[in-house]
Image (tube, helix red, strand yellow):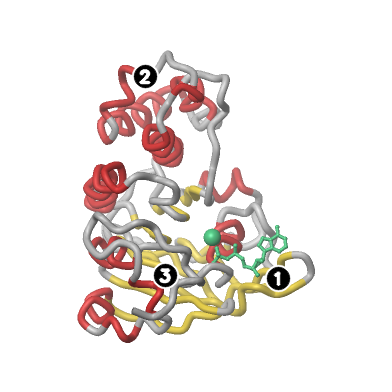
Amino acid sequence: MSASSGDRLAIEELSVARGGRTVVRQVSLEITGGEVTALLGPNGAGKSSMVLAIGGVLKPLGGKILLDGRDFAGRRPERIRGAGIAIVPEGRRLLPELTVGENLRVATYTLSGADADTGRTRALELFPELEKRLDNPARALSGGEQQMVVLAQALVSHPRFVVIDELSLGLAPVVVNRLVPTIRSIAESGIGVLLIEQFATLALGLANRAYIMEGGRIQFSGLASQLRENPELLHGAYLLRGRNGAAGAPAPASAAPPP
Ligand SMILES: Nc1ncnc2c1ncn2[C@@H]1O[C@H](COP(=O)(O)OP(=O)(O)O)[C@@H](O)[C@H]1O
Ligand SMILES: [Mg+2]
């Protein structure tokens, strides 16, 4: 499946329940091919639940996931992935006893041999440091390397859209800085990236458009530059704490007092 700029994935009025409680309430947002779109919001806002619904892991209560005029809401994960929508769920783990190469192969099992080969080549171009790790068990990798394999798993299937839930979670700043240009080049290749990220500064530095979600609803939708220039729009100043520049320690999103 090839990517091209101008592709659009539209989420329309998506609602999702967890444990009998509605935690995503009629959320609408758009992801554009060739761009990074940031989704910000405090812990518990419903971001990860929405990601799982986009990926078909959770069945939405209602709403649409529209691509090429077709609605994928409630479809099975394989079907959604096959349409070109890949999700990287929060805290995804590799199969620790399998090698890196095997973990990548697991992600291509539905593809033809040729598509699997080109997908794998492309993913290794983005993460050349994985090349020498292909025969190592995943458990032997650093946290940063494991996150690269997780991202590579999403990219081997030639997605048109990638939804990345918490890119920097648990990673050292130096590793995060390594990943930032990669996210940029993924978007430059034509893929639409939805980046969910606890460090607003990082996400807004990459994004064209941005959304803020709180209490299951979209509270802001606009240009990332609007939020960069008017940080007070990030209501709840905790969204900007933690990594102004690369050196800050991650702050728990909801516990931080205003600066
Ligand atoms: N497995 C689950 N079972 C029940 N409730 C859950 C589960 N996972 C998350 N929740 C609840 O759903 C709400 C939204 O959580 P989540 O989607 O993880 O938000 P975010 O990713 O923005 O932090 C929270 O109130 C959370 O406690
Ligand atoms: Mg989350």
* Viewer-closest of 155 and 20: 20
**Element type at mark 3:** strand
Residue 156 visible in the snapshot: no
Mark 1: amino acid? Leu
Q: Position of residue 103 (x, y in %)?
A: 50, 26
The residue sitting at 34% across, 45% down in the picture is: 172
Q: Position of residue 174 (x, y in %)?
A: 26, 43
Q: Is residue 71 above or below residue 75?
A: below
Q: Is residue 107 above or below residue 198?
A: above
Residue 206 visible in the snapshot: yes
* N-terminal label among 2 and 3: 3
Instruction: Establish whether ligand 1 lies closer than 8 Å to the Cβ of label 1.
Output: no
Q: Nearer the viewer, mark 3 or mark 1?
A: 3
- In the picture, the disc for residue 46 is none
Mark 2: amino acid? Arg
Q: Position of residue 60 (x, y in %)?
A: 67, 66
The residue sitting at 40% across, 30% down in the picture is: 142
Q: Which part of the image, by quadrant, shows the N terminus?
A: top left
- In the picture, the disc for residue 40 is 3
Q: Mark 3: few, some, or many residues within 10 Å (few <14, many ≥20)?
A: many
Q: Mark 2: few, some, or many residues within 10 Å (few <14, many ≥20)?
A: some
**Element type at mark 2:** helix
Q: Position of residue 125 (x, y in %)?
A: 25, 31
The answer to whether mark 3 and mark 1 are in CB contact below 8 A is no
Q: Mark 1: few, some, or many residues within 10 Å (few <14, many ≥20)?
A: some
Q: CA distance from mark 1 to mark 2?
A: 42 Å
Q: Quadrant of ligand 2?
A: bottom right
**In the image, is 44 to the left or to the right of 182?**
right
- In the picture, the disc for residue 61 is 1
Residue denoted by label 2? 133
Q: CA distance from mark 3 to mark 1?
A: 22 Å
